Image (tube, rainbow, N blue to C red):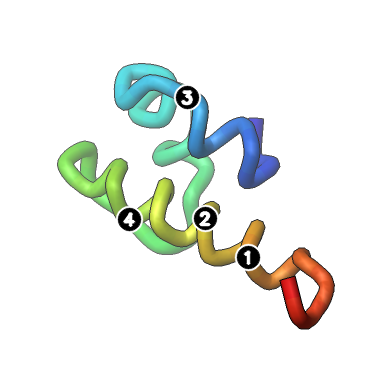
Amino acid sequence: MLQPENIISASDEELIRKVIPRSEYHLSEEQTDVLKTGAARALDRRKPQGQ
């Protein structure tokens, strides 16, 4: 569930139930967009340069 691909595709309810309680960043339930933005950024960093 903590892989970026899974975070992006998860519903807000799943994130609230499964991810936020495990988060060391102390996110609130209203901040699911922060998780999805961070996951998208992590996926972008995985891409080889020039793509």
Horizontal arrangement in the rendering, residue 43 relative to residue 24 (left or right): right
Q: Quadrant of residue 13?
A: top left
Query: At which x and y percent is residue 16?
Result: 34, 28
Residues under numbered marks 2 and 1 in contact, where contact means CB atoms less than 8 Å apart: yes
Horizontal arrangement in the rendering, residue 45 relative to residue 46 (left or right): left
Q: Tell me how far mark 4 sits from mark 3, CA to CA.
A: 13 Å
At label 2, which amino acid type do we have?
Ala
Q: Quadrant of residue 29?
A: top left
Query: At which x and y percent is residue 14?
Result: 42, 20
Q: Earlier in the sequence, mark 2 or mark 4?
A: 4
Q: Tell me how far mark 1 sits from mark 4, CA to CA.
A: 15 Å
**Is label 4 in a helix, a strand or a loop?**
helix
**Is label 1 in a helix, a strand or a loop?**
helix
What label does residue 32 carry, if any? none
Query: At which x and y percent is residue 19?
Result: 49, 36
Instruction: Please name the residue shown 68% across and 71% down the image.
Output: 45
Q: Tell me how far mark 2 sits from mark 4, CA to CA.
A: 10 Å
**Is label 2 in a helix, a strand or a loop?**
helix
Instruction: Please name the residue shown 32% across and 55% down the image.
Output: 34
Q: Earlier in the sequence, mark 1 or mark 4?
A: 4
Q: What residue is shown with label 3?
A: 10
Mark 3 vs mark 2: give the one in front: 2
Horizontal arrangement in the rendering, residue 47 relative to residue 38 (left or right): right
Q: What residue is shown with label 1?
A: 44
Residue occupying the far right of the picture:
48
Q: Earlier in the sequence, mark 3 or mark 2?
A: 3
Residues under numbered marks 3 and 1 in contact, where contact means CB atoms less than 8 Å apart: no
At label 4, which amino acid type do we have?
Val
Q: What residue is shown with label 4?
A: 34
Mark 2 vs mark 4: give the one in front: 2
Q: What residue is shown with label 2?
A: 40
